[in-house]
Amino acid sequence: MMRTDHVGIRALLLAGAATLPFAAAAQTVPGDQPTTQGATQTDTQAGTPAAATAPAEANDDLQDIVVTGQTTRDRPLITSSADITYATREAIDRRAPRSTADMLELVPGIFVEATAGESSNNYSVRGLQGGGQRFVQLEEDGMPILYGGGGADFFFQQDLTIDRLEAVKGGSSGVLTVNGAGATINFISKRPNFKEFEGAVRLTGFNYGLKRADFYYSAPLADNLAFNFGGYVQSSPGVRRNPFDYAGYRIKGALEYRLPGGGSIRLSGRRGDIETAYYASAPYRYDNGDPASIPGFNIQKDNIGGDAFTSINVPVSTFAHPSGYRPFRYRDGIRSLYNQARLDIDVPVSETISLFARSRYIDYKYDFNGLFPGSGTGNAGLASAVDYLTPDPARSPIIDVLRAGFAAFPATTRFGIRNLRTGVVLGSDQTAALNALNGNGFLQRTTLNHDAVHGKDFGSNIGARWETQFGAIKNSLTVGGMYYNVKRSQDQSATASVVNDVKNNSDIYDIVALNGANAVIGTLTDSGLVSYGDWGNGIRERKDETVSLYANDEIALGDHLRIDGGIRWERDTATAFDGVSAATNQAVPASQGGVIRTVGPTFNGQYAPTNVSRTGTDGKLSQSKIAWTVGANYLFTPNFSIYARYADGFQTNNIDPITTIKLYEAGLRYQYGRLFTGSVTVFRTNFDDQNYNFANPANPAVQQNINADLRTKGVEVDVLVRPIRWFSVDFQGVFQDPKLVNLQLDGVTDPGYAGNRPERTPASLWTVTPAIQLPNGLGEIFGRYKYIGKIFADAGNGVALPSYGVTSAGVTLNVTEKLQVAVNAENIFNVVGLTEGNPRQGQTQAITDGYFYARGIVGPTYGGSLTFRF
């Protein structure tokens, strides 16, 4: 990429300070962007057009300023007492992210399970067990995308309106935002251009079928008024084989007015309507100790879902859906729809005091149609077709259905399967044909999870900053308050399961009763459905109304020592109601075929408190907690500093107990000319009272509870070496030792788990990225090797998923000053990598006859983009 000399600009901003490098590309970060808590920044570079910002090059100096996790204006990273990183627009483009989760891999210490597709992925921080999004807050321009944090990637996708990513792990994160005590990932938008118009168009395509067009435009309207507008449209079947294409768009715009006396008022909005594919677990086999594909199903690119799941009517309580049916539509995938309005105000009252106000309102919904092979039944649901049709409790995963079949059709000689697509019937006595089915002879149970959520989330952050100086002592005090009002309703009714085979674009089968001549005398299932209401009646409502008061003080004692501390008090008044299940399950509609005659757990139209022992009969519970932190940084030279930090934070969980996290960390940052830049951080993290529910494998409609403490110690390394000007090698790594302690299942302590590693948590993960800068600003060639250490599929550490490493590469060419071409290839060597086992199988998983369920990365993908700037 093109390179420019921006040392002069840095000198004006930083007066010779030096800052920490990270693996992302470097640029001077504009000082007028919003901070996490909303304090204003200087307008030194406001409106700088994209062409004038620093281009991508390896970050080889320590002078960059970030605004996330700090409240002092223009404070360089070298002086920070928190673990902060950032990635420029160029670094994001180099990563070529296919999801929001992919971008989080730019932040050391974040373990990402980006295997679900474009959304609904999992990420965790510093040894917390995988499978969630707790303690990690995703923000856009310093405000949470959603108050609770979880589910934010449904409603945020990067595009050309995003200027950079900034992140802080631990430290002040738990004070300056809500539900982000582990980490805050802040996506910072480009600000409107007040000097001249600028724009860009980008066309992107990948071999799996992604087609996307991004656009961005900004221009001044008057001396103190400017706007910008951008977004994207796309169509994609997802990274695995799929007969369906999912389309969507996101648009975003802002109008900003600069006040005559300084400060600004900015009104912005965004809207998204996006469909995406979703992938859950799939069957694997072990081949000489390594995970591999089952014959007839290529685990690197195949997909269980397809035409057979286009639309299936599932019986449900008429109180949930008056028709008595709720359609599952795999054709729709996940559809996320949202509208947001936002207002940002920054007003300097004097040379030392400034006020800020941030508020945003988002109305959102998603309609989730996801397939979960092996859910509930686990490995027991993956069996030969012969076993499925054998009325033996020790063999058939559908023995209850077969028993009901004998009762409904007394003349039954044997059972068979009927392919819903072809109509072909195979009886249990046709063992050769059954064993040859798709080259593997397997059938499986697949859960149809239709989950719809509608939410409204209002948030505001109002405060002031007071900066003073007494000789060599400088102090910056920020105080403020946050208010959030959140409502969320959920409809997960009509969760059901079908019998299908193991192949790409799999077929669903009806179970049929046969006579001695293998003629069909009755059908036990309807559209392959073998159970209804698998996960309960599925109706829920949640509300949170929270108030936070916070203060953060940062003091510089001369040129070397900086001490800062912050505190936040939050009170959450929450309500939780679940739909009441009827005493007698409702009958299926009379027209419904099969031997299953009720809809399973039946919503009766009424709601009751989720946990009356905690909330009382009104379902309401108020809880409060204090988060606090203190840190210090000592700058020995402009190129060498050390820091230490303690933070005590928490996560609210509606009416469930507040969970806590305590973080201890210390680090050093050092640069030696252009040759070496690096940081090392040692940390210890205590997660207390981690509480969540999971499905009982024997009865998925029953939720079990796990509560545990986690202890993690580790070291984080971030090093850049540039032996010559045109070649660099960047290394990011985390090496940690996470352990479970005090684990309870349904309130009963189980010492058998003590010392185990938390599920889905690697002990090591690291990335190395070599890059070659092409001459004359022509561009760059880069590679990337990402290593993920062994993880366990369960808290019982019964199934170990092997370590793996993924190799990627890319080329960026600046054809002209305005035209850029980029090519990227992922998983070049077709490595098999598993990010989780079967989380719905319980906490003690196993491998059965060499087969198991897991979710893994895809095989090689490649594509590129064409960007034109004007």
Image (cartoon, grey):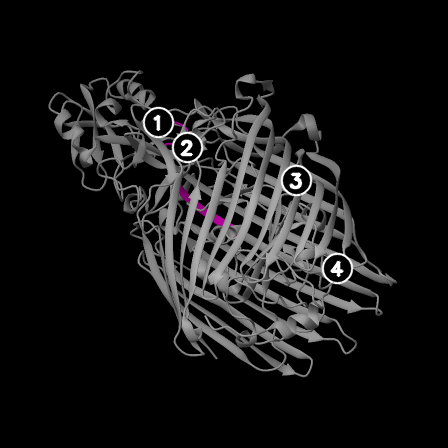
Q: In whole angstroms, how far apart are the C-alphas of marks 1 and 2?
A: 9 Å
Q: Up-down: is 405 above or below 60?
A: above
Q: In whole angstroms, how far apart are the C-alphas of marks 3 and 1?
A: 34 Å
Q: In whole angstroms, how far apart are the C-alphas of marks 2 and 4?
A: 46 Å
For the residues carrying marks 3 and 4, which lies nearer the camera in this image?
4
Which quadrant of the structure image shows residue 707? top right
**Which residue position holds label 2?**
838
**Which residue position holds label 3?**
651
**Which residue position holds label 1?**
379
Q: Earlier in the sequence, mark 4 or mark 1?
A: 4
Q: Is residue 612 left or right of residue 470?
A: left
Give the extent of the magenta segment: 365-377
Q: Residue flagged by tag 4: what amino acid is it?
A: Thr
Does the residue at mark 1 contact the one at mark 2 (Cβ under 8 Å)?
yes
Circle 2: is it few (<14), some (14-19), or many (20+) Cα within 10 Å? many
Residue 329 seen in the current view: no
In the image, residue 371 lies in the stretch drawn in magenta: yes
In the image, residue 435 lies in the stretch drawn in magenta: no
**Which residue position holds label 4?**
72
SS for callout 4:
loop
